[in-house]
Amino acid sequence: AESPFVQSFTWKTADLDGGQVMNLGRSFVSAVRVYGVLPNFTRATFAVYTTFWSFFVGGSSWDEYLYTAKGSQVGLLQQNDYEELGLSESSALVFDNKVPTMPLTRLRPSATFNSLAGFEENRWSGTQPFVVSVPTFIRMSRGAFPDMENVPMKSLIIRTKAGLTGSEYAELKERILRTTSSLPGFYSLDEVVESQQQIEDVSKVIEFGFICITLLAMVICSFSLITAMYANYFEHAKEIATLRALGYGSRGLFNVTFAESGCILLPASLLGIVAGWTVAITQSAQNGYFADLPSPMIFPWQTIIVVLVLTV
């Protein structure tokens, strides 16, 4: 918190594994992992990786709302669990930590989501997260964690300030590793910057590969094109000879042939671009649906320019 390189930080608790949520009639049951988060959770995570399905409360952000008087009785529920339990906007649910001597905790969903930044689970995970405030987490633990000092922390999320130099980032990383090395237990450091750099490197390799494939395809297609043009030339040999006899120059004949080729190749190239872009949009939407992650579309200007230049 005192580091000049840190913009904000937050953390989430370890999960109450083994719990389950039920509708009030207890006819539908879904296993969940209950997590507690701080009221600044969204400010320290990347909101682009959070996709909500519906909100049942208004006003402040979802993490701050959990720390209001009404928010102590609600939690965030995954959309699949919400549908599986047959809940509605005004429905309540109960949490069972599977301790026979402990009473059930009655709660209400404040929102439903598909994915949350800072959590590994997505809509396809077997056991989904149920997110509440830390005080509600303590209450739901039913004595397992009597106060804040006993609440276990699973992840510490640190958001750095924008514009850090390489040396500043390395210094911050070294401080974190030095601090964790002095603590008991095992800790790992996951860096978003490193992951983004790996993605950029892979994207550059893929882009270069597509350009090479495009060049190879254009070279192969050129043989077919040259063959078709020669066949067309010999097919119209009489017409060309007649035009030459009438005084039509070589440049004029070349312009006619070039215009004819352009009328064939340019629409074909544009149709290929449209078809490829349509397939790319469909594939991107499918990947985003299954991964629950943003899948940005990047128009391949370099490849398009290469195709148009070679077409001419």
Image (spheres, grey):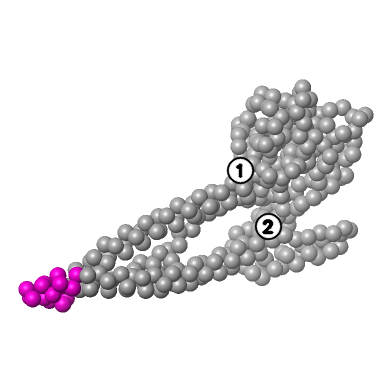
* 126 horizontally vs 295: left or right: right
Query: In the rendered view, would you say 32 is above or below 163?
Result: above
Q: How crowded is mark 1: few (under 14 residues within 10 Å), some or many (20 or more)?
A: some
Highlighted magenta segment, given as a residue range:
236-252
Q: Residue at x 80, y 44 (%)?
A: 15
User: Which mark is on residue 51?
Assistant: 1
Which of 109 and 100 lies nearest the eye of the viewer? 100
In space, the residues marked 1 and 2 are separated at their CA atoms by 25 Å
Q: Residues within 10 Å of mark 2 (few under 14, many from 20)?
A: some
Which x, y percent locates residue 180?
82, 61
User: Which mark is on residue 60?
Assistant: none
Which of 81 and 258 lies nearest the eye of the viewer? 258
Q: Residue at x 29, y 62 (%)?
A: 264
Residue 254 lies in quadrant:
bottom left
Which image quarter is the C terminus in?
A: bottom left
Q: Hey, what amino acid is under mark 1?
A: Thr
Q: Residue at x 85, y 37 (%)?
A: 141
Which of 79 and 185 lies nearest the eye of the viewer? 79
Which x, y percent locates residue 177?
78, 64
* 207 horizontally vs 97: left or right: left
Q: How many marks?
A: 2
Q: Hey, what amino acid is under mark 2?
A: Val
Query: In the rendered view, would you say 127 is above or below 5?
Result: above
Query: In the rendered view, would you say 292 is above or below 130?
Result: below
Outermost residue, left direction? 246
Q: Residue at x 53, y 52 (%)?
A: 283
Residue 248 appears in view? no
User: Which mark is on residue 6?
Assistant: 2
